[in-house]
Amino acid sequence: MWVNTMSKLETNPDGNHYGFLLPPELILLRDQIRRFMREEVKPVEDKLPHDATGCSKEDLQYLRGLAEQMGLTRLTVPEQYGGNPVSCLARVIIAEESAKCRLGAYSPALGAFGGGPPNIIWGGTEQQIEKYGIPCAEGKMRAFVAITEPTGGSDPRNNITTRAVKKGDHWLLRGRKMWITAAKGADYGVIFARTDDGDKGQPPQITAFIVEPTFPGISFNEIGVIRALSPYEIVLEDCQVPVQNVLGRVGQGFNVAQTWLVDGRIPYAAGCIGIAQEALDMVCGWVKQRPTRDGMLQDKQAIQWMIADSEVELRAARLLVYTAASKVDAGESGKVDASICKLFGTETAGRVVDRAIQMFGGMGVAKEMPLERWYRELRVKRIGEGPSEVHRMVIARDKLRNTEGGIYFG
């Protein structure tokens, strides 16, 4: 039933893309990925169950081989470690287009472009990079990042209660991490723990540790949630971590975490926009062929208004994301812009998919369509990478801090 609208390959020499002027090389990149999604990813995905979280090893190897030939792997890996780093705007284009598949919220392009290691690993020692970073970049290892705890993850610097105490040539980690994606089955993870409560009036010191699942004292418990992919609780009971597995400097883990979080939020929002755009394009095709008693469904004002609202919101969200990516590429700070993108992009995507389901009617919630899965996945996206309310707080604080007042009241 689902007709993938990505079959319409755009050739746009002037670079105009939904109202944003892209350079010619990014237009070519966009079209290349659209072709790849249509001709390679879609046929593989069509064989998978509705709530699959990935494809077979054979299919994944095939898709990654093609992506390797196109130069679209190891995109966040530094060149000196065999990477093919691209601009933030290029990563945004890739994230947006590769999310346009049923598994796009969790496994864009079915993992063809590779997840790579957490970017923070490149701030480690040469030994850590050699042991953990490069194999992960090559697809031979998988990793997770664990910050959030049962007490909350919105203010990690102050809410982290997991403690690390140095004992001889090891650190002993005790505590619990919650809602950790892809933790079980990973080859290692980066876990953040408190190593000092800080002086009076000062925040506690947080340190990042590279932890392997074979280390004594670590266990994993699956947590069933609304989406197909379950996160995990990580229980640390004096988990023994060698001193050489401290990532960065002791007490500087929060700075490491901030860099990683900001770097990922702009493409994160772009992926949500890609899903929502696909949903909107799908429903536009549907309403043009769905008859009603006195005309086609597309002729109804209620339908037109939902389509108009969705198109306007998506264009606005995309403009925020592309502008933020361009600022990062220009060397400007992206912290607040990343929060704006994450907030507006995820909330917009949720509204657009919700409207698409409404316009499809009963078919919108049928499992032969991707919409109901996207609806569930996008609900999670409003919480992951920081909930909407925290990003509103970040945006408001920045505005109040940097605004003295208007002309009439200053």
Image (cartoon, rainbow, N blue to C red):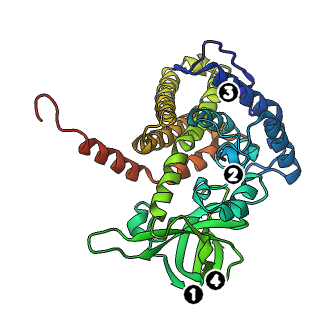
Tag 3 near tag 2, CB within 8 Å: no
Residue type at mark 1 is Gly
Q: Earlier in the sequence, mark 3 or mark 4?
A: 3
Residue type at mark 3 is Arg
Q: Quadrant of the N terminus?
A: top right
Q: Earlier in the sequence, mark 3 or mark 1?
A: 3
Compute the Cα span from label 3 to label 4: 46 Å
Tag 3 near tag 4, CB within 8 Å: no
Residue in the image at 51% along x and 31% along y = 322
Question: Which residue in the protein does label 1 denote?
Answer: 168
Residue type at mark 2 is Gly
Tag 3 near tag 1, CB within 8 Å: no
Q: Earlier in the sequence, mark 2 or mark 4?
A: 2
Label 2 element class: loop
Q: In the image, residue 174 lies at what x, y percent?
A: 53, 81
Tag 2 near tag 1, CB within 8 Å: no
User: Which of 27 and 34 lies nearest the eye of the viewer?
Assistant: 27
Q: In the image, residue 97 lies at what x, y percent?
A: 66, 33
Q: Earlier in the sequence, mark 4 or mark 1?
A: 1
Q: Earlier in the sequence, mark 3 or mark 2?
A: 3
Viewer-nearest of discs 3 and 2: 2
Question: Which residue in the protein does label 3 denote?
Answer: 30
Question: Which residue in the protein does label 2 denote?
Answer: 116
Residue in the image at 69% along x and 47% along y = 80
**Label 1 CA crowd tier, 10 Å (few <14, some 14–19, many 20+):** few
